[in-house]
Image (cartoon, grey):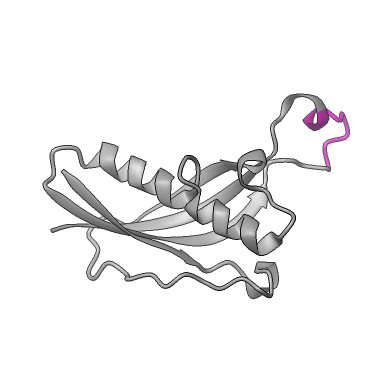
Amino acid sequence: MAVTNKGTKVSIPDAQIPSDYVKPTVVEVVSPMYPRTVILSVLKATVENADPATTLAAILADGTIGITKQITDIVTAEFIGTKTVDVHADLLSIKTNISTNDPTGDYLKATAPSYLCTVKYYVKTV
């Protein structure tokens, strides 16, 4: 089995994209057969950087927890036994798992901050 991940597009609102961030070039899967939408968690401590553009790039590309890695792992598990699969993803929204509206303050003691990323991915067997 071979998964070819063609990358992750960034389609979040421009106001959320750091001004010095360069969107990656992604070769989209033509005529995808299996589009799916998922919410992925990316641990903030793993990808955060003082530079917001570097943080956004790491959210996509971190080799252990980034969106591209998680999508590759999901597709590998879903299409086990398939000879070749092409996939690309699209980051649609990003927020955190910490709600400051929680009046109890529980989020301060028990939750590791993460980015919650809504991602649509497109798969085609080849």
Q: Residue at x 52, y 62 (%)?
A: 92
Q: Residue at x 51, y 44 (%)?
A: 40
> Residue 39: x percent and y percent?
51, 46
Question: Is residue 40 rendered to the left or right of residue 36?
Answer: right
Question: Is residue 112 rendered to the left or right of residue 81?
Answer: right
Question: Is residue 88 rendered to the left or right of residue 115?
Answer: left
Question: Is residue 41 rendered to the left or right of residue 17?
Answer: left
> Residue 46: x percent and y percent?
61, 41
65 within the magenta span = no
Figure check: 10 above or below 104? below
> Residue 80: x percent and y percent?
19, 37
Dominant SS type (magenta): loop
In this rendered view, identify the residue nearer to me: 57 or 112: 57
What residue range appears in magenta?
A: 101-108
Figure check: 61 above or below 63? below
In this rendered view, identify the residue nearer to me: 116 or 60: 60
Q: Residue at x 67, y 39 (%)?
A: 45
The C terminus sits in image quarter = bottom left
In this rendered view, identify the residue nearer to me: 8 or 97: 8
Q: How many marks?
A: 0
> Which quadrant would residue 20 be assigned to in this image?
bottom right
The N terminus sits in image quarter = top left
Task: Pick out the residue farthest to the top.
Answer: 110
Q: Residue at x 21, y 42 (%)?
A: 79
